[in-house]
Image (tube, helix red, strand yellow):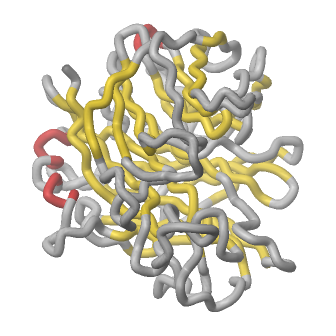
Amino acid sequence: MIDMNKAITLVLAAAITVDGTRPVVFSPYMSSRPHTPCYREPSLVAVPGKPGATPILVAFANARCDAGDGCYPAEYRGMANTSSLEVSRSMDGGLTWVPASTVYSFECAGKYPGGPILTHTAVYDPYHDCIHVLYFRKGGLTIATSADGGVSWKTTFSNDGDVGPTVGDGIVTTNGEVVLLSSHVSVSNIYKTADGGRTWQWIKTTPATPFTAESQTVTWSAGRLYTFGHVHDGSLLRNATVSQDGGTTWSTLPFLTPFNLTLCAGGMTGSSPVVSEPIQESKTIFFSHPDSPYSGRRHNGTIWRASDDGRSWERVLSITGDGDTIDDFFAYSVMTTVSANATHAHAAMIYETGGNECNVTLGPRYSPSCRMVFTWVDLPLL
């Protein structure tokens, strides 16, 4: 097992660079894709580096055809030629990011504000040292697998009968199974592999998790899976469901302290590292989201910690402010736990926020998802 605790102490300073800003992972018209107006929906995995070195960080984003959906560049250059699923990597603990590959792309046809949208979910499999990403393509879903840290990809599964995976990251269970979930609105399908993606099992869940749009899932204690999404029935709350059989059947977990937050995808991670095997259950789980009531605003990025029974949550970290400056904005986010000690879990994080590329902070061109930035977070276990 690689000792990530020692390696991670070398890179916690990457949370903030010398000029006080967080490293940018994706942004409009970045040099690698100068005609892409917007990037949305981050995924993030960590891959072990050499012994004693920092992990390799691999980030995913949808490079969209056009502006819209919370991203309105001040210097608009028109539609892009293609929409794609892009990969960037960092070899220095998140300080700098370099484009690595394009998983999938297709031509943009006609005016499609904010899209087409390539939702995706990624996971690192430490038992087989490979990355899997489940993504939406024209006509269905595909799983691609990389054995070289995200540099090249091979299609390992396709399903023309499914649409829109959940956003963020997939999971690896304590028995070594990789689990990827769909759809974007409620978890009705899961995809499993235990052999590095050589074979995949497609399972219909029973029943589909109710009203858990843009859900996130984590391997919880006692072999359970905990799924957390926002509710699309008008109550404006979060909804939790739990599976005790690896994702085939689910039951709702009633909250003691309900969330009443704006509709937005959050991030979820556990107290146990997911970079090296064996994967351990997480007795403590964390959730990141804008701490703002439903009003169309996305700011005040916050991380919560769940109680032991998963039915109540408390705020433990503040990531951004609660004002209306571009630095306060906080939209979609994703976290992945890289190491842990007796008091804290150390997690890598990417979140959507404002940026100088999009200079309107109010009104119809409000842009809380202008750019994606990286930070390390120290998550208190107690």
Judged left or right of residue 82, residue 327 is left
Residue 360 vertical position relative to residue 200 in the rendered view, above or below: below
Q: Position of residue 165 (x, y in %)?
A: 69, 43
State which quarter of the image contains the N terminus. top left
Q: Position of residue 82 (x, y in %)?
A: 72, 78
Q: Is residue 43 visible?
A: no
Q: Is residue 369 visible?
A: yes
Q: Residue at x 22, y 24 (%)?
A: 381
Q: Position of residue 307 (x, y in %)?
A: 35, 14
Q: Residue at x 33, y 37 (%)?
A: 276
State which quarter of the image contains the C terminus. top left
Residue 88 in which image quadrant: bottom left
Residue 277 in which image quadrant: top left
Judged left or right of residue 44, residue 375 is left
Q: Position of residue 66 (x, y in %)?
A: 69, 76
Comparing 211 with 324, the one in front is 324
Comparing 361 with 67, the one in front is 361
